[in-house]
Image (cartoon, rainbow, N blue to C red):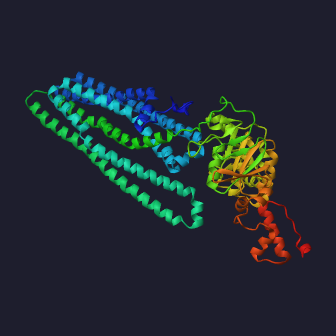
Amino acid sequence: MQIRDLPFPDPGTPDVRSGLRFLVWLGRRQLGGQFASLLWGLLHFSSVMALPYGVGIAVQSVVERSGTGLAFAGGLIALAGVGIAAGDTMLHRTAVTNWITAAARTQQLLARRTAELGATLTRRVAAGEVVAVSTGDVEKIGWFVEAVSRFLAAALTIVLVCVALLFYQPALGVLVALGVPVMALGVLPLLPRATRLADVQREKAGRATELASDTVAGLRVLRGIGGEDLFLDRYRRASQEVRRAAVRSARMWSLITALQVLLPGLLLIAVVWYGIGLVGDGRIDVGELVTVYSAVMLLTYPLRHFEEIAMAYSFSRPSARRAARVLALERATGGVTGAGGEVPAAGDLYDPATGLLAPDGLLTAVVCGDPDAAGRLAERLGGHPPEPEGLPSVLFGGVALDELPLETARTTVLVQDKDPVLLSGTLAELLDVPASRAVSAEAALAAAECGDVLDALAQASLDGDPATAPITERGRSLSGGQRQRLALARSLVADPDVLVLDEPTSAVDSHTEARIANGVRTLREGRTTVVFTSSPLLLDRADRVVLVHEGAVEAVGAHRDLLRDEPRYRAVVTREPEDGDPSPEGHVARKGESGASGAAEAARSVGLRTGIDIDIDIEETA
């Protein structure tokens, strides 16, 4: 797999039973790249370790005044130089490829799982943790996967050098063969503590990232209640904890690095001290001593990879564990068997848990006093996992939605939550969604009352065409109402069999809301539409209104009938107590107003709250 071939057509099914198993699975998925990196690593390290042999021959040739030996040594060193250059270049190329492909595979798996779980993901895993896994953790995982092959190449090279020295100069070779394992394993007792400190650092960094992500997401609310300083102090404390944990971890790794320098130095001293004695006794030549000394000195280069693989594993293990935890989340089913898994061409949408029924082809408005409960119910209607688990599945035409393939369920029922996300791009790209093509972009924009949005985008466009105007990430260059209307237009363009809208007009004024209600009703004529709202303007234009209270349907009927007969419904819609007087006269009495002007104002107020068109001429009333 080459970088130019990314993304993967299919990233595969990961082993998420543990973080280590996930790392092993990633390595096995790219055995070809690992083997190539191993071979190039062997060439590179072997060429580096061939230099001492060439240097030793050169020194001995000078001592013996041998031109042939000196020429042979020069050729060997030149050949080793070519091997070092070629091996290092290709090792770096294959290692980077392994790192990027492992990180890309992990990101694709996370993106796929996020798309499958939808909005339920952030209720099961903190949004900040998802961000941490998708950014920093992916890098750590890729680092370990690509470091394995380089470590194996370094380890094999060290073994080969020790064996070669035993044959080349047994007296010094034995000393080196005994000293190298001590150098390689001397820091092993420190690794458990270093790993624990790295885990603590990663855990604290993850919590700080979660806090930062959640704070940014709720920044507008925090500013509204004056809570910026409180959360800033919390993040400052969290970041200081991360700093202290990082310092403790760095101290331990500094000690390990120092030992990696000290131990080879002691071995070099022993080799020189013992070797000088052997030279003085005439048992070895000066060139052989130079060869062994240079070999031991250069062994510190491959030995560094022992420290690197320990660090890579220590940092990637908690990252892999978090990634495996996210990837292990499954799309739950509610236990209701569908009719062979085939979606009918049309049918009613029914939730057995609450008794909510949305008849085929009608506009059904749902009033729920708890906004959070309304959001959960909207997601259930889209075939997302029921919460709490064990609830029966939502049925479309008698078929359980959450037992259908995800793509089929999403095509059948589209849910627009109360905080829809607009990705960066142009307006044309925003509206380029999988759709039936029965609804044009122009019709959808008109129904969503996006005229002023188009004018603003046209001014921002270089050629005056709103379709080519850039939309920043999450639509931050637009107002809340403009973002909401563009998201509604996108949902209307998709033209699903069933469209579920959760508070689609909460950020627009009443006049625009009334026009949107008419536009949506007209455009979705004959198509099943469910709107979660407490707006009288939307409720008055629905074919049927359903009141859901404490997880069950309490009443069904027309808006005006429910407003008159159901105190609980009236309390939610008009924001009045259940025993309040909904009449205009009662409203006037509560406001303490009198005369024609007060009556007219009260009547208009009641009309706005109830959706009844009231137009009173003040002069005529007077």
Up-down: is 622 above or below 476? below
Up-down: is 116 above or below 240? above
Q: Nearer the viewer, residue 260 or 575?
A: 575
Residue at the far top: name it.
68
Q: Nearer the viewer, residue 407 or 144?
A: 407
Q: Is residue 176 left or right of residue 347?
A: left
Q: Give the image location of residue 417, x and y in percent.
A: 65, 49
Q: Nearer the viewer, residue 154 or 360?
A: 360
Q: Give the image location of residue 22, x and y in percent.
A: 44, 35
Q: Give the image location of residue 457, x and y in percent.
A: 73, 52
Quadrant containing the C terminus in the rendered view = bottom right
Q: Is residue 189 left or right of residue 37?
A: left
Residue at the far left: name it.
281
Q: Is residue 446 visible?
A: no
Q: Is residue 131 left or right of residue 355?
A: left
Which image quadrant is residue 479 in?
A: bottom right
Residue at 16% x, 35% y is 271
Q: How many marks?
A: 0
Q: Nearer the viewer, residue 405 or 461?
A: 405
Q: Is residue 418 visible?
A: yes
Up-down: is 426 above or below 347? below
Which image quadrant is residue 225 in?
A: bottom right
